[in-house]
Each structure stands twice: as C-alpha cells, then as structure tokens.
Amino acid sequence: MPTSPARTVRSVAFVDGVRTPFGRARPDGLYAGTRADDLAVRTVRELVRRHPQLPLDRIDDVAIAAATQSGDQGLTLGRTVSLLAGLPRTVPGFAVDRMCAGAMTAVTATASAIAVGAQDVALAGGVEHMGHHPMGSGAEPNPRFVVERLVDGEALSMGATAENLHDRFPALTRARADAYGVASQARYAAALAAGQIEPDLVPVAVYDPEHGWGLATADEPPRPGTTLEGVADLPTPFRPGGRVTAATSAPLTDGAASCLLVAEDVATELGLPVRMRMVGFGYAGVDPEVMGLGPVPATERALQRAGLTIGDIGLFELNEAFAVQVLSFLDAFGIADDDPRVNPYGGAIAVGHPLASSGVRLMIQLARQFAERPDVRYGLTAMCVGLGQGGAVIWENPSYTGSAR
Amino acid sequence: MSTAPRPERVAHARVRDVTLPRRLGTLALVTVDNGLDHSKPTTLGPAGVAELTEALQTLQGRVRRGELAAVAVTGKPWVFAAGADLTQVTAVRTREQALALGRNGHAAYELLHSMGVPTFAFVNGVALGGGLELALSCAYRTVSADVRALGLPETGLGLVPGWGGAYLMPRLVGIERALEVVLTRPAANKPYGAAEAARIGLVDVVLDAADFLEQSVRWAADVLDGTVRVERRPLDDEGTWTRAVARAREVLDATVAGSRPAPYRALELLSAAREADRVAAFAAEDDALADLVMTDEMRASVYAFGLVSGAKHPQHAPDSALARPVTRVGVVGAGLMAAQIATLFARRLKVPVVMRDLDEERVAHGLAAVRSAVERMVGSGRLSADAGARVVGSVAGSTELSALAGCDLVIEAVTELLPVKQRVFAELEQVVGPDTVLATNTSALSVTAMASGLAHPERVVGLHFFNPVAAMPLVEVVRAQETDDAAVATGLDVVARLGKTAVPVLDRPGFVVNRLLVLLLGVVVGAIEDGTPVEVADHALDRLGLPMPPFELFDLVGPAVGLHVLTSLRADLGERFPRSPGLERLVAEGTVVVLPRPAPGLPRRVDPAIQAVFDAAREHPRRDTPLDGQGLLDAVLTALTVEVGHLLDEHVVPSADQVDLCMILGAGWPSHLGGLTPLLDRTGYSERVLGHRLLPPGTADVPQD
C-alpha cells in the first residue's frame, strides 16, 4: 500500500504589494480613458520587475478580483492580465468575486493553496474601474429578495446600510463620524508628506485624444485640508435628515492593487523578502441591512482560529467604506475613535475604495507599517462586504523584535 | 479621379506635465496626435508642423524659466508619426513653397535640439520619414518592443530625409548603416523593427509594450540622474566614410542607373554629412527637398503610393454582396503553379483545398511541393508550426474528378493549351454544382473561348496569379464575355481574402501585365533580329530604372514561357509582337540567356555568347542602321504607348491608372515612373503617339501653370 504523502501546513509570506494611484470614478477622472485590465497589468508588471530573482515560470497562479466581471473586467481577469503582462503562457490564472473583499479573497484563496503545498508562488490582486462599472451595474437581483422580504430593498444601497448602522447604535453620532472622516484625510496627507504612500505606487500612463499622454503618479481622491467646519453642512444623500455624507463615505474610485504571495521556504530559497507572514483569516455573514458590521464577526472568527485576542493586534488596517462602519468595529472591540494603531496612513474615505482591489491596499499599508514598527507583532486587515459579509486577515510582522508574546 | 488634395489631418501637439520620480522635477510630454484611430496614422502637414512649433516654443520658454527638467515627444497609441503628409506635399505648386516645407520642419525640430534640457523620443509606434526624424532630433530615444516600422523611406518616394535625417543618421549610426537606412531599405521596402533598430544604434533602448510609456519615463529619469549613461559612437573616420559612399554609388549606378534623382541627392547629403556643420547641412537638405518636390519623379511616386494604398477597394467592381461564400476550393493540376495556388488558398482562406491531377505520381509531387513550401515558411518563422500543420492538413490530393464535387470554387492550372483547358472545364461541369465558380489561371489564352460550350459559361472567371504566387501582390481578375457579376464578385472577394490586390480586367490576350511586358521583350528581341547587339539591347532600358534588364526578365519567366506567350499574343494581336528565330533557337536549345549575378542587389546581365545564337538563327538580313540604345528605348516606349492606347480602347481596364496599378504590383515597375502612364505623359509619348495625355495634368506630375 502506498503511503500517504505528508500533509503539512506551510507558512505563507506576503513578499510585496503595489497599487496604481487611485483615480476618481468620473467622466473627467484620472482613468476615464484607461482600461481596467490595463490597471491590473501595471501592478503585476511592477511586482515582477521589483523582484527579478523570481523566475516567472515559478508563478503558480494569478488571481485577480473584480466586483463586476464584464467589459474591461471580463474574460477571466487573472488569465487575461497574466497574458497582457507578458507572464509565461504556462502560468494559469482565475477571476475572483466577493464584492469589496475580492482582492482579500484572492489573497486568502491563493495563500490556502500555498499553505497546503499545492502551489509555491501566487499573484493576487483586484481591480475596480467604478467609472466604467458603477456598483451593481448589469446585475439583475432576483425579485424574490424583495417580494419574499428576504432582504430589505435598502440593503442594496450601501449608503442606506450605513444609515442603518447609525440607527442601530445611537452612540454612533454624525459628529463622531465627521471627526473620523476628517482625521482620515489628515492622516493620509501626513503619510503622503512622510513618503509612506508613493513607494507602493506604480505610475500609470493615461491617454485621451484631447490631452495626449500623461502619467498618473498620485492619488486623485484625497481632499487635503478637510475640516470639521467644512463638512458639517454637507448633505446626506442616502436619507433625508440622515447622517452619512460624502465626507464620511469612501468616494467612488478607479484603481488596482496586487501582491506577491510565496511559501516562506520558497521565498528564502529565491531570496525574496518576507514583509508579512499570514497567521489566519476569517469570513462571516451578517444581516445585509447592516453589512458594515461584517468585520466584527469575521475578526472574531480569525482571532479565535489563530488563538489570539484583540489585545494581541498592534496595527489595524480597516477599510473605510463608511466612517460609521469603522466606528461600529472600534466600539465592538473597545477601541478609541482616534486610536493611533488604526489606519495610521488614513483610509478609504481619503484615498478611495476601488471595490475589489481594496483588500490588497490594506495589506500593502500594513506591510509598510510593520517595517516601521518592529515593536508590533500582529496586525489585522479587515473590511465589510456588500450584502452582509465581513472579511479579516491576521498577519505577523517578521521584523518583530520584542519579547515573545 | 479627383485631383483635389484632401484637407490636412492636422497633427495636434498635446502637452502634459509628468512628475519625474526621485524629485527630478517635471518632464513635459508632447503627444503628436491627429485625433483619429491608429488605422489613420498621424502625418505632419503644414498646420501640424506649425502647431508643434508653437508647442515647443512654449516649452522653451518654460525651460528658460526653470520649470522643466526634460521634454519628451511621443505619439498616439500604436503610432509615433508616419512622416510628412504626402497629400500636402503634392499640393505644393512652386519651389518657394517646397523650400518652406523643408525649412519649417527643420525649424520645428531644431527647437528640440536647442531645448536647453535633455529631450527624449518615446517611440511608441510606427516612426517613418519625418516621424523618425522627429525622434532623431531628440537627444535620446526609447522604442516599444512591438514597433515594426522604423525607417526613412523618402528615397523610395522621390525625396530625401530632409528634416534632419540625412545629416543626423550617419552621425548617429555610422555611414554604412545610414546608407542602408536611407538607400537600401527603402529600395527593398523593408523598414526596421525595434530590436534591429536598437542593434544599429538608431534607438537607445527597447522597452516592453505592456508599460512602455511608464518605463520610458523611468528610463528618462535614469538618464537624468546618471543611473544610465548612453554612449554615442565616434564619428566614422574619413576613409571609412569615403569608401562607403563610393560603394553605395557603384550600387546606385548599377541598379538605379540615373533613372531618378532622389537616391543620388540623398547620397550627396550623406557624403557631406561628415564635414558639414548642422546649419549648412540642413540648408542643403532644404535645397534637395525643394528640388525634388518639384520633380515629376516625386509626384509620380506619390501617385503610385496613393494608387497602391487605394487599391484595396477595386474600381468598377460589381457589388461585393454578390460574392458567393467559398468554403472548399479545388485546384485542377498538381504542377508547380497549382501547388503554389493550393498552398496560398489553404493558408489564407483557411478552407479545405483539393488538388486533382491525372496520376498518383503527379498528385504526390504536388502535395510534396505544398509540404516543402510550408516547411520553408515555418523554417523562416513566417508561419507557426501549428499554422503550417493546418495548411498541410487542409490540402488533399486526388486523381478522381469527383473529389472536386463539393467545391465552391475550382481553379485550373493545367498546361496552357486551349483544348486541354476546355476539356477540363467540360469535365468539371459534370461533377460540380451549377453555382460553383470555375476559374482559370491562364496567362494568355482566351477565357471566353475556354468557357464556350459550357452549360453555364457565366460562372467562368480568370484569376491570373503571378509567379512566385506567394510573393506577387497582383491578381488580374478576368471577366470573359459571358461571365456574370456574381463570378467576378466572388473572384474579387477571394483575391482580397488571399491578401492580394485584385484588378478587374476584360478578357483580352495577355490581359494587362503580360501584354505589356511581353511586348517590351518582343520589341527588344525584334531589334536584335534587326541587328542591335544583345548587350546594347540589354542596357537600352537602364535609364528607366525597371526592376531588372530584359534578359533577366526572360530568364525569370522562363524563356519557353516567354516565347509561348509572345507567339500566342502575335497570333491574337498581330505583328506588333515580333517573331524572333533567335529566341526560338535559344528556347529549343535550352540556353541560359544571362550571366550569374555579380553580387547581391546587382542585375543579371545578358550572356554575350547568345549574340552568336541570334546571328546564326537570323532569317532576314540586319538593317543597315540597326537601332542603338536610344533608338531601342524610343521604340519600346512608342510600342508601349500604342499598346496602352489599345488596352483603353478595348476597355481591358477602364482607366489609365489601372494600367499603372497592374504594372506596379504585377511587374514591380517603379513608383518614380508611376507604373507606366505618368512616364508616357511626361516624356510626351502619349501626346505624340495617341494625340492625348493618359492622366490629367497634375495627377502624377508637377502641374504646369
């Protein structure tokens, strides 16, 4: 009788990640004339260019996410991006969708394949050109959702679910949300000035016949100099007399982000850096009407599986779909609104949220913070997902020098 | 045809600032863009040059104010710039205007040279002529790996690289390479690809297409901060320069032979580029350009260029909707021509092809010919192994006529004997459906006669391919007396899908190309029969700059075939096509009529030894004053003029420009002659012989007013 092959779980290393500068999803936005798949191609090319010691034929899979999988985001992005980026034709690829957690899911899916020993090296990322693909465009929700009252009609409007969170938790006031949104802008501006943003960006050539070629080198959505006074009187577009404003929501955004995941032993073999080590992850469902709560049970699940507690987490990269949604997470875990461990570079309210790409943006920023903070051992990336989900990934800092904990 | 130039498609100069990495400052990126998609490449006309000048002047001001670290030029997606707008060039009426054309281009490009900060060309697509010279005017050049057309084709269009190319190219890549770029490649119509251009130093670095512009900006930054240093080759020494120019002049004398001025003017400019200063060299370019723009040769070249580019849509053709679908093709015969035709159909139409011949041996031979042709294409990389396997797999052979039963189109390529071809068609009609188009590849027989006696003569059409089938771009699509529009439309459609240019012609002996070429050969051998020495005869047409001398042409078509067509045309068209006992003797004895090629690129000359064969076979006495070279040239041009007159009177083609199209694509006649009729007009032959011009004034020559 043949003996069963040994089954061991291997450590998965986050080697590097890059993203495009983010653009405003508008007809006059940075990427109005640029294809979504081309954005993803730029990130893949930059990753392999930054690590010439990685033989391209060692890449075992390319997973690229998008919330809308049609048009310039159609045709199995992972495969098309791989071909367009000039990777060897022997490298396979696939497309991923878990709405906003697309890139995060691309990471956890490929990391799982690496962990069980099915693969060694994977590229994982996501792209969303919300200018070309407004959220939910082309989708035909089943009438049963509404007729059979499976889901409240408002659950399909993300802004409405954010308002619902304000309703459920009266302690989450507009004032707290406004303050959080203003702080996000300020933290992003400070990080930009400190040179903590630019190193992870890959410039993107943009073209339109009216202006010719240009080069996108910086994020377009942030609004530096945003003040509390400036946002106090903004309208609440999702509900008359509501609390959620443009200043406390992530703007509609175009952009792409990708990362390189490698089995840690293979990274060592190839001389690739290990910037983060995956500890574990979790996904969880919540009521679609309060989808912003999703990160809470997802994080609890991830912590429990990893045998950690919230107190072990030294850095948080939380996707800011809405300020209220981040605040609900902080309240759930007893963390202060202005805790410096949370989104130290600012978040999606400032930089933008190109849906299926944001998960990897969180990881890219956490990796940079890990390098700056050898005193921190564990970090968390987490995000909410439309229709009531949350996702969370816990990472370990290889630069950690503190006493074992 | 219309002689009014279309309005200039203005190349706009769009400028955007790009932030360079590493705090290196701002790069101003100029995009030259006519605002149309890449199928209409950007060209530079007067308005475009003016817009570029203005944009660069503005940038120079910003450089002076210290706002810029670098300036770069690029083009719209997949196109850098395809050169000067030729339709605007031919609108020029005076030498003064022509001079301004050169000067304005120089003035614009010199702004890059004198910008005051490093300048870069990001060559993202086709860069030809004035487009490549725009890149040469920059200090550094990147090129996208997918670019396949870089070059200076001007001498092929009757011009010189007059926006700096003649001076800058030899100084950049060395005189020998520059001569290749300026003279050899245009003559062979072979531009450079990106990798090759980098090898000769025409561009500094090849970058992948996937993120070409991003990496070009990064490379520019590397140059600016010294990470990358670009070495320039030293100027070639005087001896190298002189020797290379002398060698090039020898090749010109042997090939161009004074037939057109442009290559010589280019050679003069290149020759002087070593010693001349920039100002004087550019002034000389301006002068050469002004002179050449005002030559008939240049105008004829642009006419020819337009004719060939416009030929994708044949004139006077039946509605293309009448074309029948062709999903299976039969070829009758498995000889050399048949195998070539079968290969072409299988490769381009991608449909099953059946070759039918009388016995197994011939069929096997034909299939072997297909296989070896495919192997050659795969070996040279023109065809992938899979595509080659598909071609081989889709050509079948059979000795059974019934194998052709399901074909939508059957083309015969059997012996050039009318009764044989008639029998083939009669047999075919027994097995194919009533709609099957029957085509013949005859070069001189009557298609009408071939179709007579058929139940459905209306489906017979001529598809006259030229040898070698794979290389020659022309197919004469012959309408016989009974041929219906559907058969002609199917023929035109198939030819277009084969990647060839179709010219519809009426069924008259020899159609257009063979009738004129064989007439020319007939007049030449006729003169020899009358006493003109073979070597004088062989050189008599040198001044025209034809692709090869008459005896090399004889050798290429095969003396037996040439004689056969000559005899057949004389039978049909009369004594204008002379009889030559000397030629008959040469064919009978299988004598090779030319000497070996002395060097690549040089013509094969007549073997003087065949003089004795002519002398021995001569049946009538020499004339007392046989034609000299000049006299023979006159006789040839006169005969060609008469024949073009007949072609038009017989409506073989509806207009003179179709004669030119046939001669350019079917015989390789040069563009500076405009094919043929511009030559006959500008030398006065058409007016003298026919009493009228063949083309309206100004169509293919400098308008006189």
Image: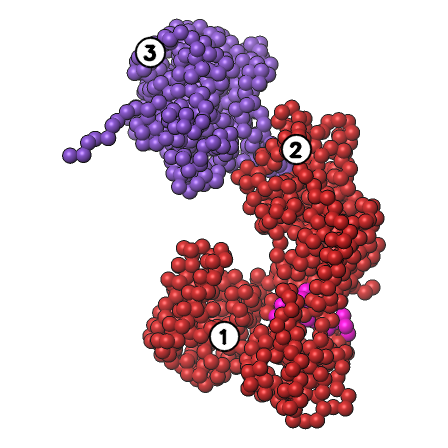
Chain colours: A purple, B red
Q: Residue at x 70, y 36 (%)?
A: B119
Which residue lies under the disc numbered 2?
A: B223
Which residue lies under the disc numbered 1?
A: B441
**Residue furthest to the bottom:** B620
Which residue lies under the disc numbered 3?
A: A308
Number of numbered discs = 3
Q: Earlier in the sequence, mark 1 or mark 2?
A: 2
Residue type, label 1:
Asn
- SS label for mark 2: helix
Q: Which residues are magenta?
A: B667-684
Chain of the residue on which disc 3 is drawn: A
Query: Residue B623: percent from the left, percent from the top?
Result: 74, 90
Most foreground residue, B622 or B130: B622
Looking at the figure, which quarter contains the N terminus of chain B?
bottom right
- The answer for how far apart the CA atoms under marks 3 and 1 are is 84 Å
Q: Quadrant of residue B86?
A: bottom right
Label ID, residue B320: none
- SS label for mark 3: loop
Most foreground residue, A66 or B75: B75
Looking at the figure, which quarter contains the C terminus of chain B?
bottom right
Q: Residue at x 42, y 65 (%)?
A: B371
Residue type, label 2:
Val
Query: Residue B100: percent from the left, percent from the top?
Result: 81, 50
In-image side of B705 versus A101 (left or right): right
In-image side of A335 versus A306 (left or right): right
B264 magenta-colored: no
Q: Residue at x 71, y 46 (%)?
A: B172
Residue type, label 3:
Leu
- SS label for mark 1: loop
